[in-house]
Each structure stands twice: as C-alpha cells, then as structure tokens.
Image (cartoon, grey):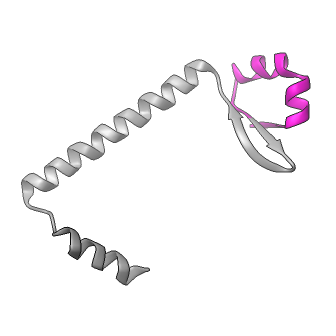
Amino acid sequence: METLNASDAKREFGDLLMKAQQEPVGINKNGKPIAVFVSAIEYQEIEMMKQRYLKLAIQEGIADLDAGNVQPGNDAFDDVRKHI
C-alpha cells in the first residue's frame, strides 16, 4: 500500500483519487497513520463483509442460546474480572 503524508495528499488530491481506484492509499500526519483512502467499490465490499460478519455472530449467539450455552451475566463479568 502506498502511503502519503497529509500535505502531499492535499496537494495531489486528484492523483490520490485515481490511485485509490487501484489500491488503498494510506495517509500519515506527523509520521502517524491517520486514514486510508479506498475506492467506493472497495468501501462497499468492506461494509458488506462487516454486515455478513455481524449476521453470522448473531446467528452463532442465537444458536448458543438455543443450545443452552449461556451463563448469568454476573458470572460472565466475574470471569472477565479474573482475567484482568
């Protein structure tokens, strides 16, 4: 992935838009990553993957409930506290 500093990205915005159609382009400010430009198509694909993942996680949760694989909330928090 090509990376530009914020000043170059601002100055070369038209080129940045064209590059983002081919591959993601990282943007750094003060040497730290702050953003990644992607094409609209790639963004839509990312959003669809997130939705599919969320649906799958919900289905798995429902399957756990149906199978009785649950524990009371207080017990779950106690388990988390033990690991912290």
Q: Is 5 positioned to the left or the right of 51 in the image?
A: right
Q: As displayed, is residue 62 above or below residue 2?
A: below
Quadrant of the drawing holding the N terminus:
top right
Which one is nearer the viewer's eye here, 25 or 77? 77
The residue sitting at 86% across, 27% down in the picture is 10
Task: Residue at 13% x, 63% y: name it.
Answer: 69
Please indicate whether residue 30 sits to the left or right of residue 1 in the image: right
Foreground: 28 or 73? 73
Asked if the stretch drawn in magenta spans residue 8, the answer is yes
Up-down relation of residue 56 to residue 41 (above or below): below
Relative to residue 30, is residue 43 drawn left or right? left
In the displayed structure, would residue 9 be above or below residue 54? above
- Quadrant where the C terminus sits is bottom left
Residue range (magenta): 1-25
Q: Position of residue 62 (x, y in %)?
A: 16, 48
Q: Position of residue 24 (x, y in %)?
A: 69, 31
Residue at x-position 36% and y-position 40%: 53
Task: Tell me the quarter of the picture where residue 81 sits.
Answer: bottom left
Q: Position of residue 41 (x, y in %)?
A: 56, 19
Asked whether residue 3 is drawn in magenta, I would say yes
- Where residue 54 appears, as percent x and y from the top left, is 34, 40
- The residue at the point 21 percent across, 43 percent down is 59
Kindly indicate the quadrant of the structure image that contains residue 36: top right
Quadrant hosting residue 67: bottom left
